Image (tube, helix red, strand yellow):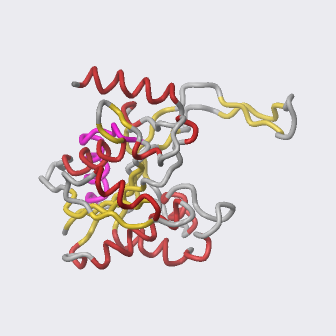
Amino acid sequence: MTVAAVLTAAGSGSRLGHSLPKALVSLGGQSLVAHAARNLLAARTAGDRHVQTLVVTAPAEHVAAVSDALAHLDVLVVPGGPTRQASVAAGLAALRSAPGSEDISVVLVHDAARPLAPPSLIARVVDAVLSGHHAVVPGLPVTDTVKQVEPGGPVELVVATVPRADLRAVQTPQGFSWELLSRAHATFAADADHESSAASDDAGLVERLGERVWVVAGDERAAKITTPRDLAVATLLLEADG
């Protein structure tokens, strides 16, 4: 039984003010994708299991640049697809072709935009899958009051206040049994090529199968980097941990 991972690195860096993919933006002297890959490879579960095969999906035109950013790590970089779902599917296909793929029992799906997700969080997700929960996501309690509205204008009507106690803000890495995630992607492969039909995360794809998804405690360090402010906060977190 082995653990494998797919790390998606295809997000645009435009909202960070960069022309290159977000994954290649520097954080503390290293690219976001390098931080994320290093943390994945550093994780150790309670049974001393670790990620043995890591596939990184990158935009086809930037595969060489992402490979260079990860040259110091034992990873395989492959072209992604037009959507996140398609990119993960490409990563899974690469895993199937990798040596030892017949032994994969757990697969993680992570985003390079969450570069500081700590090894302890990654191990927590893997341990939950190994304990028999075949689809696991990390999540944090929602602290803001959430309103449901009728969208469509500069002033929107509130139709409900959503109770916070049973809400979680979901993060990555998400973990799955190899069989379940492979089946979910095979079943909904036709949805992968268009943003309007593609799943925004792999847990959502599993939910379409009618399968249960479980939540473990998330970590504030696994926050997503989208804006310059997010990058500044991540820099402070990195300095605090360093």
- Where 99 sits versus 161, above or below? below
Examine the structure image and report whether residue 158 is included in the region drawn in magenta: no
Magenta residue span: 114-131
- Res 164 quadrant in image: top right
- Where 27 sits versus 42, above or below? above
Query: Which quadrant is the N terminus positioned in?
Result: bottom left
- Res 100 quadrant in image: bottom left
- Residue at (17% x, 48% y) in the render: 44
- Res 14 quadrant in image: top right
Left or right? Give the position of 134 relative to 76.
Answer: right
Q: Is residue 166 visible?
A: yes
Left or right? Give the position of 102 relative to 196.
Answer: left
- Residue at (67% x, 34% y) in the render: 162
Q: Position of residue 20 (x, y in %)?
A: 48, 47
- Residue at (25% x, 60% y) in the render: 75
Q: Position of residue 184 (x, y in %)?
A: 49, 71
Q: Is residue 133 visible?
A: no
Q: Position of residue 144 (x, y in %)?
A: 59, 25
Left or right? Give the position of 140 relative to 207.
Answer: left
- Residue at (28% x, 64% y) in the render: 76
Q: From the viewer's side, name the closer residue of 241 and 177.
A: 241
Left or right? Give the position of 174 relative to 104.
Answer: right
